[in-house]
C-alpha cells in the first residue's frame, strides 16, 4: 500500500464545499467525491504539536502534558511503520517540529524535507530589519518592532516571498510530487505532506483574494488571539485573507490530485486528509483558538479518507463519531499493522467497510490547563474547574520542553518521580507543578469565558444558547470519567473538575 497523509493546519470545516462551506474549494470537493467524508470528526489535544502527538500516538495527551515532544515511551505510527519496512517520508513547512517542543517528531520518519519560511520560522536573517518600512506596510495589530514575540520574524520572512513559487505551501507540494514521482514504482510507503497553511498569517498570492471588504489600510492578515474589537472592514479583511489562503491550499491540493490522475495512482494509493483544529474568525466574538471555549469552529474538523479497495465506486458519508487519535491506528491498518496496547484510538476503516456502526460514543478534547470538553455528536459539553486557580495542576514528562524553550530551573526544582502510569511502560516520569508563568499555550492571554455549559448541536448548531439539563450533564460526567480513566488521567484532575474517579 502507498499512503498520502495530507495534513493542513487550521483548516476550517466551514471553509470546504463538501461540508457546505462558502469558499469555492473544487479540489477538496474533488477529493471528497472519491472519499469517505466524516461528518462527526473532532479534535483531541490542542493546539499544533499536542494535536500531532495525538495523531502519532493514538492517545490524548492534554490530560498529562502541555505542548511538548514525543516521549520515549510513546507509540508512533511513523516509528512503527518504519520498523516494519514501510518507508515513511515527511514533507513539512511546519517549523514547530524543529523547535524544542517538537524536536522528536520528524526523526521517527525514514527521511524528511523541511521547507523554510512559515510564520516566525527563524529563517531569513536580518540583523537590522527595516522597521519603519514595516511600520508603513503592516497594520498596527500585526506590526512588531522587537524580537521577543514572533511577528517581526514573520515580516522578515515575507521579504523573501516574491512570487507564487516562493510560498512554502507551493514548495511543500513540489517536494511531495517529487517524492511521488521518484517512488511511483515502489510499494509500501507513507508520505506525510503537511503544510502550515491556512494557519495565520493569512498570506497568499494576490490572485487568490477575490472578496471585496471595503478595507483600504495596510496589510492586515494576522489576527491576535483575542476578542473581536476591529472595525467591520478590518474583520472582513481578515476573513477574506483566510479565504484566499484556503483557495491557495485548494489549488495546491489539485496538483497532487492531478498527479494521481496522470499516473493512475488512485489504483494503489490511499489518502487521509485532515487538520489539527479549526480557527475562529469572529464567531462568538473571538479570533483564533486556545483562550476561549472550544466551540465547534475550533473542535469540529474535516476528515476525508480514500481507499482504493473501498472507495473505488465513489464517495460516502460517515456519520459516526471520530477524532484525531483515530488517525494513528487507521494509518497502521492501511499498512497491515496493529496498534499497541496503550493506543486508545480506533481504526476508521471498519466504518468505511460497513463492518461497524461506531468506534466511540464520546470524544474528549481540550488544551492542557483548560476545560475538559466532550461531545457525543448530539450535544457538546464544556466543563471547567469551579475555580481555575484553586486546585493544583501538574505536567508529567521526561522531555521538559515548552514550545520554544526548555523548562526553567525553577520549574524543574520541585520535580518528583511518578510511577503510577501504565502507558509509560514502567518508566518513571517527572511530576512538575505547572507554574502560571510557564511559557506554554495559551500565550496571548489567559483562559476566558470559563463557564461550564451544555449545547444541543442539532437544535443549536452555532452553540449560542446553553442548556440546563442535569440528566444529560450527569451522563456526560460519567462518560468523561470513563474516558479519563481509560487514558489514565492523573488523580488530581478528577478533583480539579469535581468528578468522582472511577
Image (tube, rainbow, N blue to C red):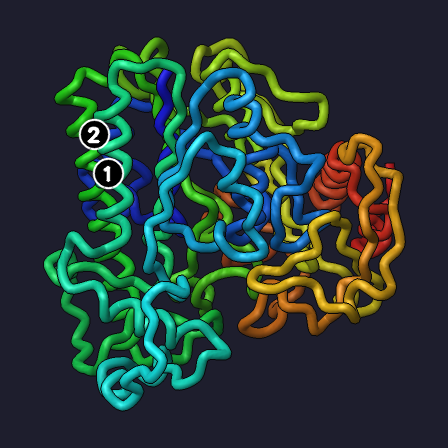
CA gap, disc 1 and disc 2: 6 Å
Q: Name the one closer to the observer, 241 or 192.
A: 192
Quadrant containing the N terminus is top left
Vertical side of 36 occupied by 52: above or below: below
Give the residue furthest to the left. Answer: 207
Q: In what element is the residue under mark 1?
A: helix
Residue bearing mark 1: 253
Horizontally, residue 84 falls left or right of residue 66, namely left
Q: Closer to the camera, 306 or 481?
A: 306
Residue 257, numbered circle: 2
- Res 471 visible: no
> Is 101 above or below relative to 36?
below
Q: Position of residue 305 (x, y in %)?
A: 38, 25
Q: Are marks 1 and 2 in contact (CB under 8 Å)?
A: yes
Q: Nearer the viewer, residue 44 or 410?
A: 410
Percent across and percent down for residue 138 are: 27, 80
Q: Which residue is pictured at 46% across the width and 30% down the height?
A: 110
What residue is rendered at 86% in x and 36% in y?
A: 502
Amino acid at each position: 500500500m502507498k499512503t498520502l497523509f495530507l495534513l493542513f493546519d487550521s483548516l476550517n470545516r466551514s471553509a470546504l464545499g463538501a461540508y457546505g462551506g462558502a469558499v469555492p474549494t473544487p479540489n477538496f470537493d474533488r477529493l471528497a467525491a472519491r472519499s469517505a467524508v466524516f461528518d462527526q470528526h473532532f479534535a483531541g489535544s490542542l493546539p499544533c504539536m499536542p494535536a500531532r502527538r495525538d495523531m502519532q500516538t493514538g492517545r490524548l495527551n492534554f490530560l498529562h502534558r502541555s505542548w511538548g515532544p514525543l516521549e520515549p515511551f510513546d507509540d508512533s505510527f511513523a516509528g512503527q511503520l518504519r520498523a516494519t519496512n514501510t518507508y515513511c517520508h515527511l514533507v513539512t513547512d511546519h517549523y514547530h517540529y524543529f523547535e524544542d517542543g517538537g524536536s522528536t517528531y520528524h526523526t521517527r520518519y525514514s527521511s524528511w524535507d523541511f521547507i523554510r519560511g512559515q510564520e516566525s520560522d527563524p529563517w531569513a536573517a536580518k540583523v537590522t530589519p527595516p522597521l519603519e518600512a514595516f511600520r508603513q506596510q503592516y497594520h498596527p495589530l500585526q506590526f512588531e518592532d522587537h524580537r521577543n514575540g514572533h511577528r517581526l520574524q514573520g515580516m522578515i520572512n515575507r521579504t523573501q516571498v516574491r512570487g507564487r513559487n516562493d510560498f512554502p505551501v507551493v514548495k511543500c507540494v513540489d517536494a511531495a510530487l517529487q517524492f511521488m514521482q521518484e517512488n511511483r514504482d515502489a510499494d509500501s510507503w507513507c508520505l506525510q505532506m503537511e503544510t502550515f497553511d491556512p494557519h495565520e498569517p493569512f498570506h497568499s498570492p494576490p490572485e487568490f483574494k477575490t472578496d471585496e471588504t471595503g478595507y483600504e489600510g495596510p496589510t492586515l492578515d494576522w489576527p491576535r488571539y483575542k476578542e473581536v474589537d476591529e472595525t467591520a472592514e478590518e474583520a472582513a479583511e481578515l476573513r477574506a485573507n483566510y479565504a484566499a489562503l484556503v483557495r491557495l491550499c485548494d489549488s495546491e491540493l489539485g496538483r497532487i490530485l492531478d498527479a494521481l490522475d496522470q499516473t493512475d495512482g488512485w489504483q494503489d494509493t490511499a489518502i487521509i486528509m485532515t487538520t489539527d483544529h479549526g480557527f475562529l474568525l469572529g464567531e462568538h466574538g473571538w479570533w483564533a483558538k486556545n483562550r476561549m471555549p472550544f466551540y465547534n469552529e475550533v473542535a469540529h474538523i474535516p476528515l476525508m479518507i480514500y481507499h482504493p479497495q473501498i472507495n473505488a465506486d465513489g464517495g460516502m458519508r460517515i456519520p459516526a463519531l471520530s477524532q484525531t487519535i483515530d488517525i494513528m491506528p487507521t494509518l497502521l491498518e492501511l499498512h497491515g499493522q496493529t496498534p499497541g496496547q496503550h493506543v486508545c484510538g480506533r481504526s476508521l476503516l471498519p466504518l468505511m467497510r460497513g463492518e461497524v456502526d461506531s468506534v466511540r460514543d464520546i470524544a474528549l478534547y481540550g488544551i492542557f490547563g483548560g476545560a475538559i470538553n466532550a461531545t457525543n455528536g448530539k450535544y457538546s459539553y464544556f466543563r471547567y474547574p469551579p475555580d481555575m486557580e484553586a486546585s493544583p495542576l501538574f505536567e508529567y514528562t521526561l522531555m521538559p520542553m515548552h514550545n520554544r524553550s526548555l523548562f526553567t530551573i525553577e520549574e524543574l526544582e520541585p520535580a518528583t518521580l511518578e510511577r503510577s502510569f501504565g502507558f509509560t511502560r514502567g518508566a518513571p516520569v517527572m511530576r512538575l507543578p505547572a507554574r502560571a508563568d510557564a511559557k506554554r499555550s495559551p500565550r496571548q492571554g489567559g483562559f476566558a469565558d470559563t463557564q461550564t455549559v451544555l449545547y444541543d448541536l442539532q437544535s443549536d448548531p452555532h452553540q449560542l444558547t446553553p442548556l440546563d439539563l442535569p440528566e444529560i450533564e450527569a451522563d456526560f460526567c460519567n462518560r468523561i470519567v470513563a474516558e479519563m480513566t481509560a487514558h489514565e488521567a492523573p488523580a488530581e484532575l478528577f478533583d480539579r473538575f469535581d468528578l468522582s474517579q472511577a
